[in-house]
Amino acid sequence: TTDTQRPDVLVIGGGIGGLSVALALIRQGLRVRLCEQAPAFGEVGAGLQIAPNCTRILHAYGLLDEAVQLGVLPEYMIMKDALNAAELTRVDLKDMERRYGFPYMVIHRSDLHGVLLRGCERAGVELVTGARCAAYENIEGGARVTFDGGGSDEAEIVIAADGLRSVARKLIVDDEPVNSAYVAYRGAIPFERVRANDVHEKDVVLYVGPRCHFVQYPLRDGQMFNQVAVFQSPKALAGEDDWGTPDELDCAFEGTCHQVQKGLPLMWRDRWWRMFDREPLMKWVTGRIALLGDAAHPPLQYMAQGAVMAIEDGWVLGEHVSAQHAKRSEKGSGVDWEKALAAYEAVRPEHCRRVVLTARSWGELWHHVAVEREQRNAVMRARDTYDYSFMDWIYGATALTPDQEPEMYPSIPLDSVEI
Ligand code: FAD
């Protein structure tokens, strides 16, 4: 990259996390350059659920209306048993919107990515593609990255939003992604193709089954329909390399209800996503290099908070920059980065640690077999539709400081349940 003018901030990675932190920081009057390894910006995959703790932030950025126009605000989120399709519990999403002040939205991944990208373009973020960062280092008063091919770039701060397989993370910890042995198949198709399949046109429906689950929801103003099929791969458990293949998909869902069976042939079968997370990490900052998004806290997707947490990270950093921002001078942007980064690191890792660990136990709860399945179903059926005690800590306003972080809910003692 040619350095026309040194930016204040260099963001590595143009996924949802990178774009949203670029936007958060340019809104604070900083010069922001973002470098993405791919030759063009984009997102692969299908739908995303975006909870109120994130629509609140999109609203603050002035992007919520555009996002809602491209997405759907579903009416209910319903959990059913995948074997017999019996309803276990539901959330009234209109009531939830009243409680948290902002809607629960579902949106095509590429649409949300596009909303953020256009937001960055309008705000003047310098967007660079085809720039793969190979190394990060701290330098006097800032940090530097070196790209494949030899070029380099530097800024007062480098934000590494470089995803699950982050290069920057290695500066802080020498860990590896944790293989859950679960795999996801996805598929977003025209709604017409599922009209006869006994689907809910306006709801998010989750079928929880033995070692598998199936998710359905509408996309693009109801014109499209999103389906996600997730299951435990016997080949992964056996240590085979070739795991998660379509034959395993069909086996995993044998014995599930007709609603799920009808959905399976419509999944994309040429591509699947093996599910990894990482052990929680409490240190995200080293000098002037800070991790953000999946680079810092890749979750299993069961709480649907991965992209949401990435967007929250950027917003929190932006707010702390705003609080630590003196006047720009010839010396630089005027941000006290030590203070802003310390404030970021004081609050976000603990929140994300909770989400990453809760996502794991949420997955266990969904995938129970035999007696534990019956116990889970009894607990879910007993839940009041309007009981939000499991949600307040996650869907309420994003904490800026540790003392704002709410208490988590107690865990569910399944063995105390009568069935
Ligand atoms: P990424 O999206 O991985 O972006 C990283 C970017 O950095 C990429 O563009 C990559 O090309 C680039 N990059 C990587 N390395 C380099 C490098 N060295 N140099 C330059 N660029 C680099 N989340 C939700 O909130 N709601 C959901 O409903 C939801 N559902 C999900 C369903 C599935 C099946 C899966 C797999 C995930 C789901 N998630 C969901 C999680 C969500 O997709 C991720 O947490 C989120 O996209 C992470 O964004 P990111 O920008 O941090 O990382």
Image: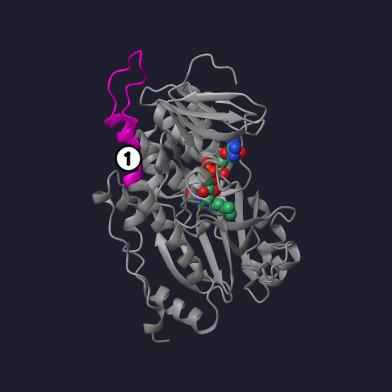
- Residue 331 falls inside the magenta stretch: yes
Whether 293 is drawn above or below 394: the answer is above
Q: Secondary structure at mark 1?
A: helix
Q: Nearer the viewer, residue 388 or 120?
A: 120
Residue segment shown in magenta: 319-346
Whether 314 is drawn above or below 405: the answer is above
Quarter residue 239 falls in: bottom right
Residue denoted by label 1: 342
Q: Residues within 10 Å of mark 1 (few under 14, many from 20)?
A: some
Residue farthest along the left direction in this orientation? 403
Residue positioned 45% across, 81% down in the render: 375
Q: Name the quadrant where ligand 1 sits.
A: top right
- From the top left corner, tell me how far across and down residue 297 is, in percent: 47, 50
Q: Is 87 left or right of 266, judged from the image as shown?
A: left
Quarter residue 345 falls in: top left
- From the top left corner, tell me how far across and down residue 39 is, in percent: 67, 30
Q: Nearer the viewer, residue 269 or 194?
A: 269
Q: Nearer the viewer, residue 143 or 86?
A: 143
From the image, which quarter does the C terminus lie in? bottom left
- From the top left corner, tell me how far across and down residue 109 is, in percent: 56, 43
Residue positioned 66% across, 61% down in the render: 196
Residue positioned 60% across, 21% down in the render: 1
Whether 35 is drawn above or below 360: the answer is above
Q: Is 252 left or right of 155, judged from the image as shown?
A: right
Which residue type carries mark 1? Ala
Q: Is 212 left or right of 297, judged from the image as shown?
A: right
